Image (tube, coloured by chain):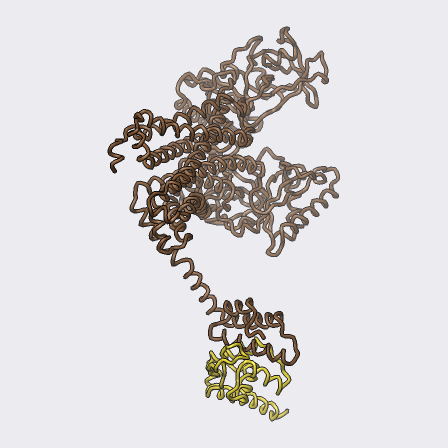
Chain colours: A yellow, B brown
């Protein structure tokens, strides 16, 4: 729970990007994350929002990144790959739990 | 296939995107481009650019704190490192040569100081905010203009003011005010006359912040004549008249002899809603019977008494000046429709302008004076630039070896040029300190100066931030102007030749530049001296106007018993006053006059001989005088007699009126024949006929010396009683004891009645030309200063030339040149500079003189005498300043020089 109070609740975008990163495993980088989200949810995110979200998650410590070797099709530029950290997983779980609890409470509230 | 992003995209990424993202983002984009092309989607440079721009901008925004810090650091790295070093080096160089530094800084200080001193004056009179008043950007001034846009000097009645105030929702509040001279005295204290404003109860609401102690007027005090009479006094009156008494609030004072209670003291420096006001007392319009008894008792209910010449309003927060103007005009149209008999409201419009100064006629005159003075000091500053520029150029020459070494070691030319730039900037800022001292001193010197006759003497102009900014600004401009040529010249040093210490060609081109700067200095000083000479000669012509009598032995003072509510009692007062003044020892005579000579008051009469008709009317200056007036001025009656005591203050509504005419009027009206006994008709509603009883010598008594000497005098009080008058006192000895005796004797008649305008007539005469006198004095000072700076500049340039050409002179001497010949070589150079400077200066003057043409009186702008004086003065002074260098050239030791 502490991750909420310090860093705030995860936003929608943050959740989407974290989940996509988890699914992609070793090959999670900006382009593949965006493609994965679009393929699964039909939501086409803007390129810039993916970068901004990754940058924010990185600074919050929810993801970690490393540079993969440059390839010719990338013009010799390195690829920045991402993986979800343990804190990121907890934050994701916490956000889901919070939503779930609220949903349960509202549907089981006794009506007068 | 292209494997990189377009150049612009790369640049965008480099500038905007944080370093940890830069490579991977461009890699991603390149990868995507390839994939899109493979899929047959558009992936041209436009698509790439748009995608890059969006990503770069988003990441930049996300990390903007890092980014600005980065940019700043980069900018600092590029500029500051070098600059700081430059300044440090410049400071070292300046310290190393204290003589040079002192000369240059002093010259700059004079130029910047003179400039800022004049700006300080202009700021004080025209630009500064009114002291104390808050949110002045929400204030508007409302005056009258005709439909054709011409300013009209008139006012609105209290009734119309109230209509305007209540029906203009765009204004939070509206105040009306009018300046009068009133009498004030602490109970039992001596009375004084000062500027006061009769104001509406809203005055201190509109001018919020003007009250420092106590409070402003309430609505009731402003509109209800039965309310307790309240007054607000200025901080100045509080400190000077009441010794800054802490219990001033609630004290009783006498205003025009009526008791008022002081309820407030204004902020220091606040003297009404204008920068040039002198108001020391405020009373509400409801107390008009006590304050301004000359107005009818029905003032508050009458539309005829157009009392308020000035109106100031405070805008509602979200309303523009235009909206307020439109609403005011709509109200005016309403008043005009309701009162068709009042054509003024129909013909005139309200001039609504932002700000508080509501006296454009004063502003116009002042800003013309200030513009001229700023032009003069601007020229002086230009000259200073040329002077210091040539000093810096000399340093550039001396340091070309150093510059070449730096260039050879790999410094950029910009860097080398910047060295001198830093030096001149540093010099200017060093000079700004004594310059501000000059400004401070000049403000003290200007205190009490009369700028124009209609304004009170100047207060001490306080230096504010605006003035400091101006000083810094002009210092920077000077540094740029003076430093740019030398810096440029230093950065263009030819490395090889300078290192070989030959550098002759460069020395020659620099010398040419230095000569040009010297010529400029001589030219500017010729222009300034010529302007000053023209103005001085014009002023002398004016002061030499013969008024026709000896003004130095006539003292004048004024009284206004009407203000104290004398009514018919004033007739006896005037007689008693004259009796008491005439018996003072050392007074040879005294007389009463309606319009004091050389004051701003003036009246004209149209008149014609009885046997003629109005078609042949003559214009003459009219004045009303008592018996004794002519003898007090020392004017003999050429024909006939003076007025008698019986004619003094005798109304002539049933006929029997008399006049005295001037010699020239008598000649114009009656030809060569005798005038005494002839009768004239004076144009008025009744066209009264008057008998000429005397003819007096011609005089000029008008404010601005007029050509006409046609004057007609009638006995004081014959056509109308006057609540105020001036007394002219013929002196037989020193003036001071007479003045104190007059004060004592007037107080014996009425201790509550002050006398004012106590002045000798020669001073009153000179005061008419106050603003021109200020210009003449300042222009003279500044042009002499300019000439001195130019002379020092010429001296420096010649000395430098002699030093540079030592070897040449040595060779010449060895080849047989005489010391005299060498000296002539130098003085020949001086003469060439001088003559070119003078010619250019005269040409410039021919063009610039148009700016003072309107101020010249009795002197042609192409006055030969002035040109001769200016050329001779500049010629002699600069020629003398070239003597030391010429002598040094003559004394050079040829053998020693060649050996060295």
Q: Quadrant of the C terminus of chain B?
A: top left
User: Between B345 and B516, which is closer to the camera in this rendering?
Assistant: B516
**Position of the N terminus of chain B by quadrant:** bottom right
Front-lying residue, B461 or B636: B461
- The residue closer to the viewer here, A71 or B338, is A71
Task: Give the residue drawn at x 58%, y 92%.
Answer: A104
Residue B435 percent coordinates (x, y): 39, 42
Residue A5 in sight: no
Tally the numbered discs: 0
When asked about the image quadrant of residue B666, the answer is top right
Looking at the image, which residue sits at the far top?
Answer: B673
Toward the front, the furthest residue is B815
Percent across and percent down for residue B493 are 39, 47
Res. B704 in view = yes
Taking the image as shown, residue B878 lies to the left or right of residue B579, namely: left
> Left or right: where does residue B879 sit relative to residue B330?
left
B292 displayed left or right of B742:
right
Position of A17 relative to B323 (above/below): below
Q: Residue at x 62, y 11 (%)?
A: B667
Residue B442, percent from left and from top: 41, 37
Give me the residue at 72% from left, 37% from top.
B343
List x then y, in percent, for residue B712.
Answer: 60, 17
């Amino acid at each position: 729970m502490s991750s909420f109070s310090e860093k705030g609740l995860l936003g929608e975008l943050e959740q989407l990007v974290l989940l996509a990163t988890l699914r992609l495993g070793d090959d999670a980088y900006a382009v593949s994350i965006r493609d994965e989200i679009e393929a699964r949810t039909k939501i086409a995110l803007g390129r810039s929002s993916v970068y901004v979200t990754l940058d924010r998650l990185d600074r919050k410590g929810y993801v970690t990144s490393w540079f993969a070797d440059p390839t010719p099709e990338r013009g010799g530029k390195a690829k920045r790959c991402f993986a979800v950290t343990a804190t990121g997983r907890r934050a994701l779980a916490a956000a889901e739990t919070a939503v779930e609890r609220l949903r349960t409470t509202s549907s089981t509230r006794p009506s007068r | 296939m292209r494997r990189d992003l377009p150049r612009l995209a790369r640049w965008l990424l480099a500038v905007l995107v944080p370093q940890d993202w830069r490579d991977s983002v461009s890699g991603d984009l390149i990868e995507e481009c390839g994939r899109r092309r493979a899929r047959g989607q558009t992936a041209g440079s436009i698509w790439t650019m748009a995608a890059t721009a969006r990503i770069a901008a988003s990441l930049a925004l996300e990390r903007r704190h890092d980014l600005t810090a980065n940019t700043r650091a980069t900018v600092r790295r590029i500029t500051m490192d070098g600059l700081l070093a430059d300044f440090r080096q410049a400071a070292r160089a300046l310290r190393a040569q204290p003589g040079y530094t002192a000369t240059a800084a002093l010259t700059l200080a004079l130029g910047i100081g003179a400039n800022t001193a004049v700006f300080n004056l202009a700021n004080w009179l025209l630009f500064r905010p009114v002291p104390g008043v808050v949110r002045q950007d929400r204030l508007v001034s409302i005056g009258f203009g005709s439909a054709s846009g011409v300013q009209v000097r008139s006012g609105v009645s209290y009734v119309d003011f109230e209509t305007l105030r209540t029906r203009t929702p765009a204004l939070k509040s509206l105040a009306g005010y009018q300046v009068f001279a009133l009498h004030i005295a602490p109970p039992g204290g001596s009375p004084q006359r000062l500027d006061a404003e009769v104001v509406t109860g809203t005055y201190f609401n509109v001018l919020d912040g003007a009250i420092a102690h106590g409070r402003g007027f309430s609505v009731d005090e402003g509109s209800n004549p039965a309310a307790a009479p309240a007054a607000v006094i200025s901080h100045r009156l509080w400190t000077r008249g009441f010794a800054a008494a802490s219990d001033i609030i609630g004290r009783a004072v006498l205003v025009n002899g009526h008791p008022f209670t002081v309820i407030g003291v204004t902020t220091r420096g606040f003297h009404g809603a204008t920068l040039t006001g002198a108001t020391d007392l405020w009373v509400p319009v409801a107390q008009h019977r006590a304050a301004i008894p000359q107005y009818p008792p029905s003032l508050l209910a009458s539309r005829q008494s157009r009392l308020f010449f000035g109106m100031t309003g405070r805008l509602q927060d979200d309303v523009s000046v235009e909206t307020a103007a439109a609403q005011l005009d709509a109200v005016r149209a309403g008043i005009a429709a309701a009162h068709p008999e009042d054509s003024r409201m129909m013909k005139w419009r309200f001039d609504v302008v932002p700000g508080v100064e509501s006296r454009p006629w004063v502003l116009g005159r002042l800003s013309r004076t200030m513009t001229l003075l700023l032009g003069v000091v601007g020229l002086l500053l230009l000259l200073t630039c040329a002077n210091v520029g040539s000093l810096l150029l000399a340093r550039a020459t001396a340091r070309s070896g150093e510059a070449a070494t730096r260039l050879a070691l790999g410094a950029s030319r910009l860097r080398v040029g910047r060295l001198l730039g830093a030096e001149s900037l540093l010099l200017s800022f060093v000079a700004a300190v004594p310059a501000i001292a000059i400004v401070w001193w000049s403000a003290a010197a200007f205190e009490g100066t009369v700028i124009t006759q209609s304004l009170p003497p100047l207060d001490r102009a306080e230096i504010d931030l605006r003035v400091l900014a101006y000083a810094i600004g002009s210092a920077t401009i000077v540094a740029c102007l003076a430093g740019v040529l030398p810096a440029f010249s230093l950065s263009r040093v030819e490395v090889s030749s300078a290192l070989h210490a030959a550098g002759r060609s460069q020395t020659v081109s620099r010398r040419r530049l230095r000569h040009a700067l010297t010529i400029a200095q001589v030219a500017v000083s010729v222009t300034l001296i010529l302007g000053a000479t023209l103005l001085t000669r014009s002023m002398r012509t004016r002061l030499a106007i013969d008024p026709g009598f000896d003004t130095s032995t006539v003292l004048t003072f004024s009284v206004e018993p009407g203000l104290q509510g004398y009514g018919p009692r004033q007739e006896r007062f005037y007689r008693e006053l004259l009796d008491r003044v005439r018996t003072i020892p050392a007074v040879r005579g005294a007389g009463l006059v309606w319009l004091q000579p050389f004051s701003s008051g003036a009246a004209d009469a149209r008149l014609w001989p009885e046997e003629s008709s109005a078609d042949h009317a003559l214009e003459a200056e009219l004045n009303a005088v008592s018996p004794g007036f002519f003898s007090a001025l020392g004017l003999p009656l050429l024909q006939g007699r003076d007025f008698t005591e019986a004619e003094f203050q005798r109304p002539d509504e049933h006929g029997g009126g008399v006049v005295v005419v001037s010699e020239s009027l008598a000649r114009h009206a009656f030809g060569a024949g005798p005038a005494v006994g002839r009768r004239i008709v004076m144009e008025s509603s009744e066209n009264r006929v008057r008998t000429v009883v005397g003819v007096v010598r011609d005089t000029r008594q008008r404010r601005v010396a007029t050509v006409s000497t046609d004057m007609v005098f009638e006995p004081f009080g014959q056509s109308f009683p006057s609540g105020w008058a001036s007394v002219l006192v013929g002196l037989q000895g020193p003036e001071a004891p007479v003045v104190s005796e007059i004060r004592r004797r007037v107080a014996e008649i009425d201790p509550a009645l002050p006398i004012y305008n106590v002045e000798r007539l020669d001073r009153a005469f000179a005061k008419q030309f106050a603003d021109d006198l200020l210009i003449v004095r300042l222009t003279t000072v500044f042009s002499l200063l300019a000439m001195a700076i130019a002379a020092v500049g010429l001296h420096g340039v010649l000395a430098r030339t002699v030093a540079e050409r030592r070897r040449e002179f040595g060779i010449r001497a060895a080849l047989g040149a005489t010391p005299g010949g060498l000296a002539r070589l130098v003085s020949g150079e001086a003469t060439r500079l001088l003559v070119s400077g003078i010619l250019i200066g005269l040409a410039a003057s021919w063009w610039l003189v148009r700016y003072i043409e309107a101020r010249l009186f009795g002197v042609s702008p192409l006055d030969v005498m002035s040109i001769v004086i200016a050329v001779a003065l500049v010629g002699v002074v600069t020629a003398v300043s070239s003597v030391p260098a010429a002598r040094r050239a003559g004394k050079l030791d040829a053998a020693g020089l060649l050996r060295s």
